Image (spheres, grey):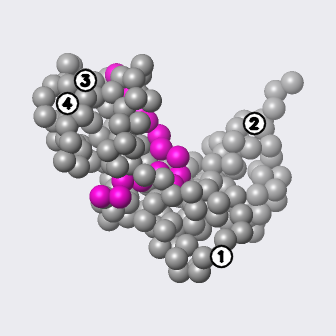
Amino acid sequence: MRPAEANWHMVFVKENDNLYPILTGTFSSAGTIPFISAEILWIRFKLGVFMPHLSMKKTLANTETILPTASNQKFWIKSETLEMPTFDNADTFINRLIHSEILTYDPLIDDILNELPTNLSPRTIRHRFIQATGLSQKHIRQIQRARQAEIYLQQGKSILDTTYELGYYDQSHLTKSLRNYIGFTPSQLFRPNRS
């Protein structure tokens, strides 16, 4: 199972000496993914980081896109060929994407999620959210709340306490949310404290 995901990723898979650069978009609900035995470098981007030349909603949302390779160690993105990153040079790789204006960051996303005041219209905020994340502000908050519920339940907090503390209407609302965004029910996630 894979949970819903508000962040997008670049994933570099090495399987049998073949390298696959993959853009993994945001996922609006939980789903299944195939298991592969391979080396994987997974770069998860902060909310608000996006590629302005791609539509987060139309191109990346709910998809995994294999990028074209230029050689065994290089791939194409936008109009550039880049070397596949390694764990040791991932920061340098990201800095190159920023310098080449392949990646950019919209600080408004962080401000809104942290409930900081802004003088922008609700329409402008909605537009920038969709542009930078591919998801609405409400959808991101629902995913984050479901993730918090998962953590609470796995730490042994009761289902009723989790429901109350996170503001779900009732237990069935919590169950529906977790099934949709995490892929499991509260009872499947609950780990009672063992003293």
Tell me which segment is drawn in magenta: 39-53
Q: Earlier in the sequence, mark 2 or mark 3?
A: 3
Which secondary structure lies at badge 1?
loop
Q: CA distance from mark 1 to mark 3?
A: 49 Å
Which secondary structure lies at badge 2?
loop
Q: CA distance from mark 1 to mark 2?
A: 39 Å
Q: Let me know if residue 89 is in the magenta part.
A: no
Which secondary structure lies at badge 3?
strand
Q: Position of residue 67 (x, y in %)?
A: 22, 43
Dot 2 corresponds to which residue?
Answer: 155
Furthest-front residue in view?
A: 99
Dot 3 corresponds to which residue?
Answer: 15
Q: Position of residue 97 (x, y in %)?
A: 35, 41
Mark 3 closeness class: few <14, some 14–19, many ≥20 residues within 10 Å: few
Report the amino acid beneath label 4.
Lys
Report the amino acid beneath label 2.
Gln
Q: Residue at x 24, y 44 (%)?
A: 77
- Is there any visible trace of residue 8 in the rendered image? yes
| 148 to the left or right of 195 | left
Which secondary structure lies at badge 4?
strand
